[in-house]
Amino acid sequence: MAEAKPPGTESGDVDPPLQPVFKDGKYFNPWGGLWHEEATFRERLKFFFGKSHANVPRSERELDQTLPIVKPDLSVFATSPETGVRHMWVGHATSLVQFDGLTLLTDPIFSDRKSPSQTIGPKRYRKPPCSIADLPDIDCVLISHNHYDHLDLGSVLALHKRFGENLYWYVPMGVKKWMSDCGVQNVVECTWWQEVSHSMEPVFKVMCTPAQHWSKRTLTDDNKTLWCSWCVKGPKHSLFFAGDTGYCPAFKAIGKHYGPFTLATIPIGAYMPRATQSRVHLDPEDAIKVHKDVRSQTSIGIHWGTFHNISKEFYLEPREKLKELLEEQGMSPAAFITSKHGEIVIV
């Protein structure tokens, strides 16, 4: 596998460059105004202690009706589809994706909690549809940033134990050291607009692209590592993984330089209250903008319906609001879909 190359060396100059700001050991979003600012301590307190309208049922029977978990037939991943992209939603931002002979995972979290501890912290109300032991052979993992619901220690260790150095990890700047400390060495670290040749035959390109977010794992490491989205281009098909992001000018540039995409996985949940969350999380309306900006042929909504206590909107609202907005805008319901946990679709 080739090393990551500097921005523009394989795809031409990026205009505008949209590089992250790095100052005093911290990364910042480059667009100025509200996009550049972090939520204040007071705003964060208001978020954590504000009234929640999530109303997640306590009854597993009710959840099985409203958010069913499908037992997947993972044997289909033994052979890549001849045409289209195969996708299975594990939950939250974790997807199992396969196309053109490549199989990958995005932001894998199979743990019960998104937390430094598995005894406290936000807990899943929808379990993963499979275990890491059940997974088919995987070629690579895309990590968008280091928050606990996107970079999960237990899942990283379990994947490394199972696949070892046969598995490649693509991470944003600053995350490689954390991976190395976990014993994972097969890691490629990138900044925005860097490209990597994952394999030469067939040719797969992995591109690190911008996102509007932040990073943190401890009390003192705010924004010391970068956040990103990812593009993967194969011989016939392509994927855009938005990671975790608010809406920003970057997506039109991504669509211009790397679109169109066969499939995009785009967050649609964890967006209330907008006063704080709009900087870092898409709502369904903004998600549709991203879908259009990156020129996705089909998008799947992620980052919803999985964890307690990460947002204030009704737990089914992301899915229902997305449907309503597609109808209002005269878009095909097949253009931007949601899927059940464990449901395998080909787009």
Image (cartoon, rainbow, N blue to C red):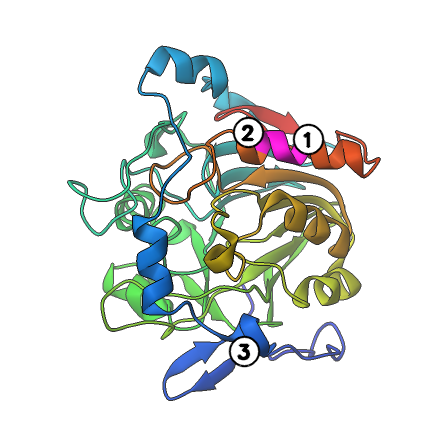
Crowding at dot 2, Cα within 10 Å, few <14 / some 14-19 / many 20+, comes out as many
Query: Which picture quadrant has residue 174?
Result: bottom left
Q: Is residue 158 visible?
A: yes
The magenta segment: 319-323
Where disc 1 sits, the SS reads helix
Residue 323: numbered disc: 1
Of the image marks 3 and 2, the number of the one nearer the N terminus: 3
Question: Quadrant where the N terminus lies?
Answer: bottom right
The amino acid type, in three-letter code, at marker 1 is: Lys
Q: Is residue 16 left or right of residue 283?
A: right
Residue at (33, 65) in percent of width and height: 42
| Of marks 3 and 2, the one in the foreground | 3
Residue 77: numbered disc: 2
Q: Which residue is disc 3 drawn over?
A: 20
Q: Nearer the viewer, residue 55 or 80?
A: 55
Q: Is residue 338 left or right of residue 117?
A: right
Of the image marks 2 and 1, the number of the one nearer the N terminus: 2
